[in-house]
Image (tube, grey):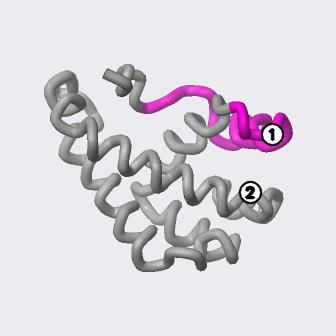
Amino acid sequence: MKKGYLLAKLFPENLKDLTLFVQQETERFRVQEEYIRSIWAERTLVTADFWFGLVSNTEKVLEWFNVTLHRSPRVFSDHLFNGYNAIFLTNCLVEYADREECSPKLKEAIHLLFGHDKMIVADLNQ
């Protein structure tokens, strides 16, 4: 069973908040894109172009599936965690786990399934 689907099935009441947070993350990365690209280390496994490709893919999924993402655990997991998009979604979930509105049980589940490490550690609140 996929980790994204398991999380969505265990916490269906949180899918709307998670989907909204993912959308906010795509917007945050777009606003800070120039800055992020300027500080991105060269010769890394994940390049800035690859990362922003994931952001773009996620934006398309959010647009195409909209409210269906938070109404269906299957749609949420199948489309937001599809292929390499899981890398961006994992980063979003780990970020969300650090927020006050994330319940202790959801936070624990996120860390258990996806770990504690963020992919992007730069302070984007410049």
The residue shown at (42%, 79%) is 64
Residue 119 place in picture, x, y as percent: 43, 32
Q: Start and end of the magenta stretch?
A: 100-119
Residue 80 place in picture, x, y as percent: 51, 63
Q: Nearer the viewer, residue 20 or 113?
A: 20
Which amino acid type is shown beneath numbered disc 1?
Ser
Q: Nearer the viewer, residue 65 or 54?
A: 65
Q: Is residue 75 above or below residue 98?
A: below
Instruction: Return the residue at label 2.
Output: 14
Q: Nearer the viewer, residue 75 or 100?
A: 100
Which amino acid type is shown beneath numbered disc 2?
Asn
Residue 6 place in picture, x, y as percent: 74, 59
**How far apart are labels 1 and 2 at the CA level?**
9 Å
Would residue 95 be found to the left or right of residue 54 on screen? right
Q: Secondary structure at mark 2?
A: helix
Which quadrant of the rendered structure holds the C terminus? top left
Give residue 84's mark: none
Q: Are marks 1 and 2 in contact (CB under 8 Å)?
A: yes
Residue 45 place in picture, x, y as percent: 27, 34
Q: Is residue 23 above or below residue 78?
A: above
Instruction: Return the residue at label 1.
Output: 103
Q: Earlier in the sequence, mark 1 or mark 2?
A: 2
